Amino acid sequence: MSTLVVVGSQWGDEGKGKVTDYLAQEADVVVRSQGGNNAGHTITFGGEKFALRSIPSGIFNPKIKNVMANGMVINPKQMLEELRGLEARGIKDYQLFVSNRAHIVLPYHEMLDGAYEAFKGDKKIGTTKRGIGPAYEDKASRIGIRIADLVDPELFKATLSQTLTIKNMELKMLGLPELDFDTVYNEYVEYGKQIKKFVTDTSLLLEEEIEKGSKILFEGAQGVMLCIDHGTYPYVTSSSPTGASVPLNAGIAPRYINNVLGICKAYTTRVGEGPFPTELDGDLAHYIRERGHEYGTVTKRPRRVGYLDCVALNYARRVSGINYLALMLFDVLSGLDEIKICYAYELDGKKINTVPATLSELERVKPLYVTMKGWKEDITNVKSFDELPLNAQLYLRKIEELTKTEIVLFSVGPDRLQTIKLKDIF
Ligand code: GDP
Ligand code: IMO
Ligand code: MG
């Protein structure tokens, strides 16, 4: 048995999809365990580009069992559209298993997500408006509807009728149109029928795979700095994307997690509002944004761009149990005279090495930087560490030194082939 958790170690969009797809070539099972279609995971191979939202990134390989586990919030309509989209592009031979305990996202969740954001005005989170927060809210309030309910017409009728009564009161209070029970029921009961064939107890499935000695890859969504518990609250998502959350969200024992691979860009990006200590603006931000095509996969928003922040990275390493790193989008930094890396923050005249808890402190921190020499060479065709220009090698080694974590893989372009493995950990 071998397990590996792929975790976003920044604010999401680090290249988790690419790494999962790359490592999935050796996997038996790929599991998504939290989040929903707020995620957008881009995968490029054989001249084709795919953007997955809620379907695990092992879907392209017919031998892989793809699991959508209990910790996810699944939008049935979107999930079926995503599958149809894949099928239309020739991905027809796949194995998919959906947890009967995962919660579902319904139209009122998306409406409420939008309404809360509008209400917050300039304090808005900048959510993806996919209803993810309100769906997790219902789960915690114990009025959520689960996949097991959806696929049973009678159970669905009972749970939806109770929940919709409450949700319609909320919608009305917020000045939004109330939803008609029959309309929602009739549409979604149909989706339930289509999803039913995928539904199972995925915790049991994973236990069987573990006993068989399978190789299991857990594909994180979002990133540790967006974690509901450890992120820059309240500018976070509504689940925990950490390695620690995987056993809970997938229904397996913590002792089965062998390694946690933190995926990190060679710089930092963030989409949505909230603190970002190393954020850049002006020409340098523009240079990185355009070279890295830093526009959101889900919402197409331009991503905010900054220098690599090793304080945040070390924080993510600690709270998520990251023991290896993958360095992504390395090619984007070619052409710069110098590149800075943040190694500590200064807060009210004192040097600190961790991420403070409050927004007001985070707004006051000043990043302290080491300045590294840049390199001019195009590195998109590099096949080994030794082929990297010396200054790129030194940049990579500096990150290892500052995070005390080994980089086991680096990436020099979006394609599956533009991946250089330095050490086998799966
Ligand atoms: P995820 O959400 O963590 O899976 O990441 P996204 O797919 O949202 O964003 C990462 C973006 O970077 C995608 O457009 C990828 O195709 C692209 N990408 C991944 N690795 C590299 C790389 O090494 N170099 C370049 N130039 N692009 C990359
Ligand atoms: P992947 O898996 C980047 C951000 C949103 C917003 C905050 C809350 O592709 O890395 P939500 O809709 O979850 O309530 O939004 O979290 N966010 C992401 N940012 N990548 C993601 O996923 C994200 N999922 C959510 O932009 O700031
Ligand atoms: Mg993404």
Image (cartoon, rainbow, N blue to C red):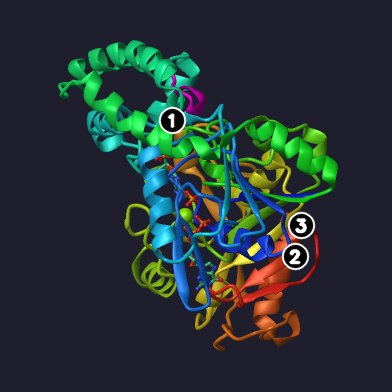
Which quarter of the picture shows residue 194? Answer: top left
Q: Residue at x 38, y 57 (%)?
A: 85
Tell me the residue that label 1 is attached to: 104
Element carrying mark 1: strand
**Residue range of the region highlighted in magenta in the rendering:** 144-149
Q: Image check: 290 left or right of 255?
A: left
Left or right, residue 356 beside residue 203: left
Q: Which residue is mark 2?
A: 408
* Residue at mark 3: 405
Q: Is residue 146 magenta?
A: yes
Q: Is residue 419 magenta?
A: no
Which amino acid, mark 3? Thr
Count the marks: how many? 3
- Mark in the foreground, 2 or 3: 2
409 over 391 or under it: above or below: above
Tell me what residue is drawn at x 64 percent, y 30 percent.
Answer: 201
Q: Is mark 3 within 8 Å of ligand 1?
A: no
SS of the residue at dot 2?
strand
Q: Nearer the viewer, residue 311 or 131?
A: 131
Q: Residues within 10 Å of mark 3 (few under 14, many from 20)?
A: some
- x then y, percent, for residue 225: 54, 43
Instruction: Check contact, mark 2 vs mark 3: CB within 8 A.
Output: no
Calculate the distance from the C-alpha at mark 2 to the C-alpha at mark 3.
Answer: 9 Å
Q: Residues within 10 Å of mark 2 (few under 14, many from 20)?
A: some
Q: Position of residue 3 (x, y in %)?
A: 77, 48
Q: Earlier in the sequence, mark 2 or mark 1?
A: 1
Q: Nearer the viewer, mark 2 or mark 1?
A: 1
x and y percentages locating residue 411 in the rendered image: 61, 72
Q: Is residue 287 above or below residue 305?
A: below
Label 1 crowding class (10 Å Cα cut-off): few <14, some 14-19, many 20+? many
